[in-house]
């Protein structure tokens, strides 16, 4: 097989040859030759013209062209070759041809394109139309967490039985409430809203202020409302109009081991006494709660704040966070950690971890929600647990954060009457009892707390009723997500130890005041005075600055080793490809699992080997989280760098290496003086790709840490995403995006320019 | 001695690359009790498929795979089609002009999609294409065209212009030249580009997250990242690892079959003009 490459075509003028065995030689640039389009190789005299002709004989080159065996043609070929042989050496003709070129008959390709186009049009119109129709089969959709126990399924089933013309679709969403809120927000923004809005208590103000919810004043009767807990109903109002009907309620409270402490502490001072007396870290801590940076942290924190007599917002929506009460609350929370009453790992706890910890008997007390009771009754702690309202400062009132879920209707819902019927059914005693017995949901309907069935199965509901009366709502404000984010960040910073209570209180106050005042900044001015942006840029720089060099070092190492010939080399190449080929988001979940404490393999390995004494909470410390992110990124992108450098290495001719080593150069010398300079163009290319991708990274960090503890791994693209999709500041987000894109383009152009000179030479 | 050291290093590279994958599979095969048990076991004591069953039982995972296939496949077809035409025209331009234009393609090829989500989302919303396969297909096509054009241009440029002239003489129209001569001759490069584009679309996360907010339209990476738990507060690590294993094993099989081409493609696109 010949396969050769054309470089330049020679403009030649053949001359008729004399005396080649009597054959007549025609000028070789006739139509015949053009059709033949012979591609001849400059074979350095290895093959005689006749041999080439013999090889070409019978070859089909295109649909209409076949070199046949007529002597005259052969003679022509010979003549061409002869003519070419006389041409100057500089002008050479390298020709490619392919044997067995397939072609399905003559004709234009236009028909093919038309057919392809029509087919594509059909497919795409199908795709465009079908999904819309599919959705129409489910008129009322709601998102909720995994329906364990089939509570909602049963409620919906009974509703379907009573109302055969209405269909409800319960979409199972992620367990994280923040994520489900994002799903709702995305669906509102997309204009394809979920009709039934199954809302957390704090979502009402935001959704209502954006006009996404239907006011339910006329839709839901007063009698229905008065049967529910007043605080809960109150939380469903925004600016005087009613938007959310509570379906299940929730309140934060203190669980304690009845068998280990007969009298639970009710005040902070009593807690101190109890902890100093009975706690015995690390076998048994005094108290656990939710200390991770998420919405649950705000719930915990507010219970301390209210317990100190403070409040985040005053009656005129003025911010009260610079007062002493707040400082006292933050200081007390910090003390709980510093004095060892709670384990430091509390900073990584959400509800599940705190519950497991308490369940395993490692703590005397726990702050959690009512659902935990049901779980505990099925565990070894059955019968040993009691509940009381959460602790407060002496002389103040106890308070529990109101939680719970309710239903609203999207303004764009097509069948609001149907939705209203479902909501009324959901708060009916029948449905409430289903939700209670199958799911452990705390009913929103007051009367059920005197219900015999319920009291028999859950006698603690008497205590729960008392606790529910102490419930208080978080600030009702459309900017609540932003407020919550600020509170989360600074409370987390206090717990982690980055900020002191005083600093945090001041920062909180300032930041929230800024949020409440509204967006008065113009973007350029905001660019320079945005502290979040500064932190974000720093995180991005740190991340890029750490991961890119490591990628290159490791990539070069891999490339050098895989370049060496050995058996199993293709298996090695395959394994090097694997990290690059797998979806980043998917592998980030695996990394999250591997960095888990205590079940993660990384902790396990390091402890076994002896590098670590105790397992670390990687993803809950700023350094650990950044390390994990960098590690995972280096793991993923090393193959890409390795492959590019490998191709570079393979393009270095072996003779050069040998000559250098003969001249007395050791491996290091060869590497430094020969390999590296020749690799430079490849390094440059890989550098462009990697720096830009590392700077704009999203998938890995979002899935792994969501921005990390206290926003310490939040990079620029995460910030932009949050601005646009969570805080609804699309203008500012786009502004930042444009700046970022322009700078990336400039950087890449600069790097390309220097490399472009290389291209011109080709 | 040197040989053992050599093979040690090779083995550690091997381990480094494949360990997370192995860990995911290993966790997926453990029953739930063993997953959350200390001390950590490095090989499942009892192999159980309950996690795999749960993955499919609790959510429409098969649907996710189908969505991924549709969007990635559609985008690949569209990208290759568009890029072939573009590369064909670039090839006809001559090297200098083509290179000048292609430099801008390079810029387009390296832009991280995370920065383009918001504008793309807004455009798709205007077109009422949100939650529609077309949104993702079009977006992926747009994102991948620069890279595909780059690669196909390099491949097409290897074929001599004389082919075109000969074909023109034969009576081929330009579109026929593209379809019947150039494309069949550059099948390897087409395949490589298609594979790379497909992999990129399959792995893409943020656009799929933003443009397909409804659960029935999730692609596989989005579905896994948003995996819900058995109760409100629980993270189902066993199921998550099972889903990961289900997704990654086919990908690994595919790249095992195509590794030579993939490497060729990555390097060719990156280095040669």
Image (cartoon, coloured by chain):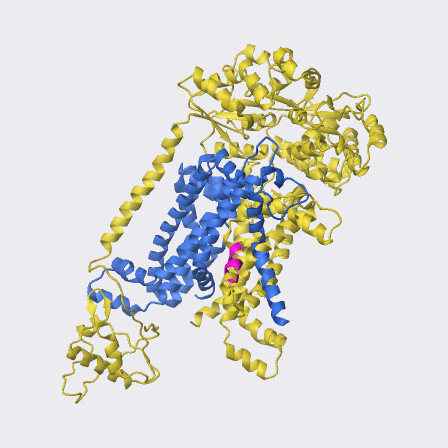
* Image quadrant where one finds the C terminus of chain A: bottom left
Residue A708, image quadrant: top right
Secondary structure mostly seen in magenta is: helix
Q: Residue at x 33, y 60 (%)?
A: B88
For this orientation, the residue located farthest to the bottom is A19
Q: Is residue A72 above or below residue A203?
A: below
Colour of chain A, in one word, is: yellow
Q: Is residue A556 above or below residue A634?
A: below
- Find out whether residue A534 is within the magenta segment: no
Q: Residue at x 43, y 41 (%)?
A: B123
Where is residue A716? Give x, y as percent: 59, 47
- Find out whether residue A576 is within the magenta segment: yes
Q: Is residue B174 left or right of residue A198?
A: left
Q: Residue at x 51, y 68 (%)?
A: A648
Colour of chain B, in one word, is: blue
* Image quadrant where one finds the N terminus of chain A: bottom left
Where is residue A434? Give x, y as percent: 55, 18
Residue toward you, B124 or A116: A116
Where is residue B79? Give x, y as percent: 38, 52
Q: Which residues are magenta?
A: A572-578
């Amino acid at each position: 097989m010949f396969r050769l490459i054309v470089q330049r075509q020679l403009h030649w003028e053949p001359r008729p040859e004399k005396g080649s065995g009597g054959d007549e030689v025609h000028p070789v640039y006739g139509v015949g030759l053009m059709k033949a389009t012979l591609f001849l190789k400059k074979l350095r005299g290895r093959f005689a013209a006749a041999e080439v002709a013999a090889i070409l004989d019978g070859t089909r080159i295109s649909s209409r062209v076949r070199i046949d065996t007529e002597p005259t043609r052969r003679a022509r070929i010979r003549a061409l070759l002869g003519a070419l042989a006389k041409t100057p050496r500089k002008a050479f003709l390298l020709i490619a041809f392919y044997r067995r070129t397939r072609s399905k008959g003559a004709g234009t390709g236009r028909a093919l394109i038309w057919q392809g186009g029509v087919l594509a049009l059909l497919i795409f119109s199908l795709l465009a139309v079908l999904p819309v129709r599919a959705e129409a089969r489910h008129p009322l959709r709601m998102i909720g967490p995994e329906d364990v126990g089939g509570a909602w399924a049963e409620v919906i089933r009974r509703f379907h039985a009573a109302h055969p013309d209405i269909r409800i679709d319960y979409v199972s969403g992620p367990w994280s409430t923040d994520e489900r809120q994002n799903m709702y927000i995305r669906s509102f923004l997309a204009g394809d809203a979920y009709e039934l809005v199954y809302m957390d208590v704090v979502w009402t103000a935001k959704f209502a202020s954006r006009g996404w919810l239907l006011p339910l004043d006329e839709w839901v009767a007063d009698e229905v409302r008065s049967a529910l807990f007043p605080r809960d109903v109150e939380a469903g109002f925004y600016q005087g109009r009613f938007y959310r009907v509570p379906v299940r309620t929730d309140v934060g409270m203190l669980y304690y081991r009845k068998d280990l402490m007969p009298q639970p502490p009710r005040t902070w001072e009593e807690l101190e006494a109890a902890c100093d007396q009975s706690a015995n870290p690390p076998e048994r801590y005094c108290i656990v709660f939710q200390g991770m940076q998420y919405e649950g942290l705000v719930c915990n924190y507010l219970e301390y704040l209210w317990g100190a007599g403070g409040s985040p917002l005053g009656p005129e929506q003025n911010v009260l966070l610079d007062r002493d009460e707040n400082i006292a609350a933050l200081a007390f929370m910090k003390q709980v950690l510093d004095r060892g009453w709670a384990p430091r790992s509390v900073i990584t706890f959400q509800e599940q971890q705190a519950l497991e910890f308490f369940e395993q008997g490692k703590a005397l007390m726990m702050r959690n929600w009512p659902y935990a009771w049901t779980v505990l009754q099925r565990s070894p702690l059955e019968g040993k647990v009691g509940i009381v309202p959460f602790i407060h400062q002496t002389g103040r009132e106890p308070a529990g954060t109101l939680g719970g879920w309710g239903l609203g209707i999207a303004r764009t819902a097509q069948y609001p009457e149907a939705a209203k019927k479902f909501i009324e059914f959901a708060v009916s005693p029948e449905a409430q009892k289903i939700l209670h017995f199958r799911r452990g949901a705390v009913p929103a309907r007051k009367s059920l707390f005197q219900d015999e069935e319920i009291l028999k199965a859950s006698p603690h509901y008497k205590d729960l009723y008392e606790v529910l009366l102490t419930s208080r709502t978080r600030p009702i404000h459309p900017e609540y997500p932003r407020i919550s984010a600020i509170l989360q960040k600074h409370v987390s910073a206090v717990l982690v130890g980055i900020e002191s209570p005083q600093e945090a209180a001041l920062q909180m106050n300032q930041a929230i005041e800024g949020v409440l005042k509204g967006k008065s900044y113009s973007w350029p001015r905001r660019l320079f005075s945005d502290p979040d942006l500064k932190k974000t840029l720093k995180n991005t720089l740190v991340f890029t600055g750490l991961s890119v060099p490591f990628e290159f070092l490791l990539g070069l190492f891999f490339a050098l080793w895989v370049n060496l010939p050995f058996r199993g080399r293709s298996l090695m190449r395959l394994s090097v490809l694997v990290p690059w080929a797998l979806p980043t988001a998917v592998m980030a979940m695996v990394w999250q699992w591997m960095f888990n404490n205590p079940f993660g393999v990384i902790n396990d390995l390091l402890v076994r080997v002896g590098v670590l004494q105790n397992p670390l909470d990687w993803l809950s410390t700023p350094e650990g989280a950044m390390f994990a992110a960098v590690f995972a990124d280096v793991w993923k992108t090393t193959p890409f760098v390795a492959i590019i450098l490998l191709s570079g290495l393979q393009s270095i001719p072996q003779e050069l290496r040998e000559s250098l080593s003969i001249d007395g150069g050791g491996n290091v010398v060869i590497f430094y003086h020969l390999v590296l300079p020749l690799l430079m163009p490849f390094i440059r290319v890989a550098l462009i790709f990697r720096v830009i991708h590392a700077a704009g990274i999203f998938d890995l960090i979002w899935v792994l840490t969501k921005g990390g503890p206290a926003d310490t791994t939040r990079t620029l693209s995460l910030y932009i995403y949050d601005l646009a999709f969570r805080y609804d500041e699309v203008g500012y987000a786009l502004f930042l995006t444009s700046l970022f894109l322009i700078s990336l383009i400039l950087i890449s152009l600069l790097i390309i320019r220097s490399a472009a000179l290389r291209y011109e030479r080709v | 001695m040197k040989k053992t050291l050599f093979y040690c290093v090779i083995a550690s590279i091997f381990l480094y690359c494949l360990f997370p994958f192995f860990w995911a599979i290993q966790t997926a095969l453990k029953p739930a009790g063993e997953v959350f048990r200390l001390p950590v076991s490095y090989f499942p004591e009892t192999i159980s498929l309950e996690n795999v069953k749960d993955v499919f039982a609790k959510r429409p995972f098969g649907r996710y795979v189908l969505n991924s296939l549709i969007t990635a496949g559609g985008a690949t077809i569209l990208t290759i089609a568009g890029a072939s035409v573009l590369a064909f025209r670039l090839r006809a331009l001559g090297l200098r002009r083509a290179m000048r234009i292609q430099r801008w393609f390079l810029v387009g090829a390296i832009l991280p999609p995370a920065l383009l989500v918001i504008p793309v989302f807004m455009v798709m919303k205007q077109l009422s294409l949100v939650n529609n396969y077309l949104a993702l297909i079009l977006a992926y096509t747009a994102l991948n065209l620069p890279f595909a054009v780059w690669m196909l241009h390099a491949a097409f440029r290897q074929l001599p212009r004389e082919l075109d002239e000969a074909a023109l003489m034969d009576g081929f129209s330009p579109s026929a030249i593209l379809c019947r001569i150039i494309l069949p001759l550059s099948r390897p490069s087409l395949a490589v580009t298609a594979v790379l584009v497909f992999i990129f679309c399959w792995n893409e996360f943020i656009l799929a997250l933003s443009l397909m907010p409804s659960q029935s339209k999730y692609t596989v990476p989005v579905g896994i990242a948003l995996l819900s738990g058995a109760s409100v507060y629980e993270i189902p690590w066993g199921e998550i690892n099972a889903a990961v294993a289900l997704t990654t094993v086919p990908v690994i099989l595919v790249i095992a079959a195509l590794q030579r081409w993939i490497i060729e493609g990555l390097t060719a696109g990156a280095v040669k003009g």
